[in-house]
Amino acid sequence: MIAIYLRLFVYITKHGAYIDGFSGPQEPDMPDMWTAKLVLESEPKRLTQFFLCEKNRKSYAAIDELAAKHRTRKRKINTYFMDFNTAVHEVISTGNIREKTATFCLLDQRTFECKWSTIEALASAKKPSGMKIEQFYFVPTGWLQRSLSALKNKQIPRAWWGRDDWERLQSMPGQSCANSFCQRFKSELGYRHAHAWPIFERAEGRRVMYYMVHATDHDEAPRLMARAYRAATGQPLEEQLPFDPSWPLRKKGDSAPRAL
């Protein structure tokens, strides 16, 4: 889904930067499911700046090897052997992501790894007059309640949610929880659009394992993500696409809703 979206993304932007905060392979024995690899191999190769971060030593070694295969004079691939909650500030301060650099950040965390302060740092990396860094954020609704109940260190969910009222998520249905993140991306961080895309346990099943929240300032980006979602999952958009009155389905002069 991400690789398909970024292919559409660069057709519009003609350039771009990609940040992957938790970029190690989730399944080492399934390289074709490794997002960083798929993105680096994606065509056309208009993404020219990459920031790949991983704190696990073995996973980082795989990233370093992958980067060496794809690094060229035009493609700058920066790797960070550290926690992305710390590395995010180095990524932002490099000066390589400028005000007009179209930037996409994947936050495919392992349950509670990504702190809300990291999301805030990405959202405020550019001036208010420009377009924010797009964020694609993992919300583990399929096992969230169980994981919250099992935690002994209550500072972990506090840092993840960024507020003291994280306990209310324990009694919240999965979609409502994902929608709460969408609302915060818009109301607290100032994104124009934020949509939660459900990912199912099986292609033919109805159990949602988790949601991916896409936050962006670009009016065309939700439509591109809808196309990527449909192509990757085969799920019917009329059932899964959340309603958002701030998402214009028509442009001036259109006689009918624009096709996805």
Image (cartoon, helix red, strand yellow):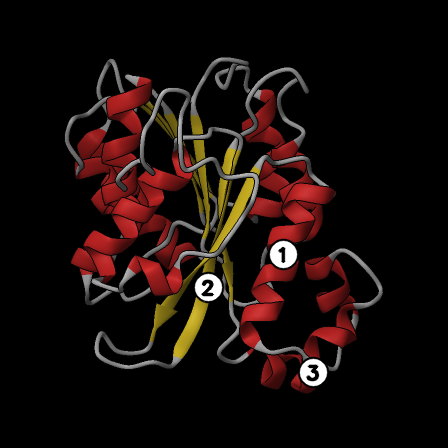
Q: Position of residue 101 (x, y in %)?
A: 45, 17
- Is residue 242 shown above or below 130? below
Q: Position of residue 115 (x, y in %)?
A: 66, 53
Q: Are marks 1 and 2 in contact (CB under 8 Å)?
A: yes
Q: Give the label on residue 181, or none.
A: 1
Residue 77: give x, y in percent of width and height.
34, 28
SS category of the residue bearing label 3: helix
Which residue is nearer to you in this view: 95 or 78? 95
Pointer 2 residue: 211
Residues under labels 2 and 3: Cα distance?
Answer: 17 Å
**Amino acid type at image mark 3:** Ser
Figure check: 6 above or below 213? above
Nearer-the-camera pick, 222 or 41: 222
Instruction: Name the residue: 60% across, 86% down.
Output: 146
**Residue 42, quarter of the rendered image:** top left
**Residue type pointed to by label 1:** Phe
Q: Secondary structure at mark 1?
A: helix
Residue 1's label in the rendered image is none
> How many C-alpha atoms fall within 10 Å of the one at disc 3: few (<14), some, or many (≥20)?
few
**Residue at the spot 84% in from the left edge and 64% down from the top edge:** 164
Seen from the viewer's position, the closer of residues 155 and 229 is: 229
- The numbered mark at residue 171 is 3
